[in-house]
Structures are given as structure tokens and as C-alpha cells.
Image (cartoon, rainbow, N blue to C red):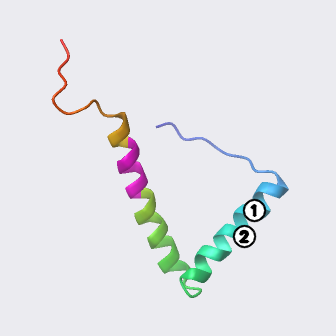
């Protein structure tokens, strides 16, 4: 997957900051714990996306 730089406008940045603040607050202000949880969640989402992209089991090509 190629790297992309995303540019946010001020409204999007404010919305992202609000979500990030809420996520850190759910982890009692522990930013490192929140970051680790985000990494785990991101990994699970990548696994789900990969599963959706994969051909169904038992399907043969050729």
C-alpha cells in the first residue's frame, strides 16, 4: 500500500482532535495505553480488510 499524505482543513482537524481527546480520556489520560490500543484496533481492521479481499476458500483459478 503506497504512503499518502492527507491534508485536513481546520474543521476536520478539530473533529479529529475531539475524537483523539475522547479516546485518550477513555484510557484515563494514558496516551501510551491509548496508542497501543489504537495499534491493536488498526491491526484487527487490516485483518478484516485482507479477509474481504481474499478469494473465497476452495475457489480455484485456472
Q: Residue 6: horizontal and vertical position, in percent? A: 68, 46
Name the residue located 51 percent from the left edge and 71 percent from the top edge.
35
Report the front residue among 15 and 58: 58
Query: Local crowd at mark 1 within 10 Å, few (<14), some, or many (≥20)?
Result: few
Quadrant in which the C terminus is drawn: top left
Disc 2 on helix, strand or loop? helix
Q: Is residue 17 above or below residue 11?
A: below
Q: Using residue 5 as the reference point, say whether residue 1 is left or right of it.
A: left
Q: Is residue 36 magenta?
A: no
Q: Residue 34: horizontal and vertical position, in percent? A: 52, 75
Mark 2 and mark 1 in contact? Answer it, CB < 8 Å. Answer: yes
Q: Which mark is residue 15?
A: 1
Name the residue located 75 percent from the left edge and 62 percent from the top edge.
15
Where does label 2 land, which residue? 18
Q: Using residue 23 as the reference point, say whether residue 36 is left or right of it.
A: left
Q: Is residue 44 magenta?
A: yes
Q: Residue 20: horizontal and vertical position, in percent? A: 64, 70
Name the residue located 57 percent from the left edge and 81 percent from the top edge.
26
Disc 1 on helix, strand or loop? helix
Q: Is residue 8 above or below residue 27?
A: above
| Residue at mark 2 to residue at mark 1: CA–CA distance | 5 Å
Q: Using residue 61 as the reference point, say whether residue 28 is left or right of it.
A: right
Q: Residue 37: horizontal and vertical position, in percent? A: 45, 71
Give the magenta range: 43-49
Q: Is residue 54 above or below residue 10?
A: above
Amino acid at each position: 500500500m503506497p504512503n499518502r499524505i492527507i491534508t485536513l482543513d481546520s474543521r476536520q482537524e478539530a473533529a479529529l482532535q475531539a475524537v483523539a481527546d475522547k479516546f485518550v480520556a477513555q484510557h484515563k489520560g494514558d496516551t501510551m495505553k491509548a496508542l497501543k490500543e489504537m495499534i491493536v484496533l488498526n491491526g484487527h481492521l487490516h485483518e478484516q480488510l485482507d479477509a474481504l479481499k481474499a478469494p473465497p476458500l476452495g475457489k480455484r483459478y485456472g
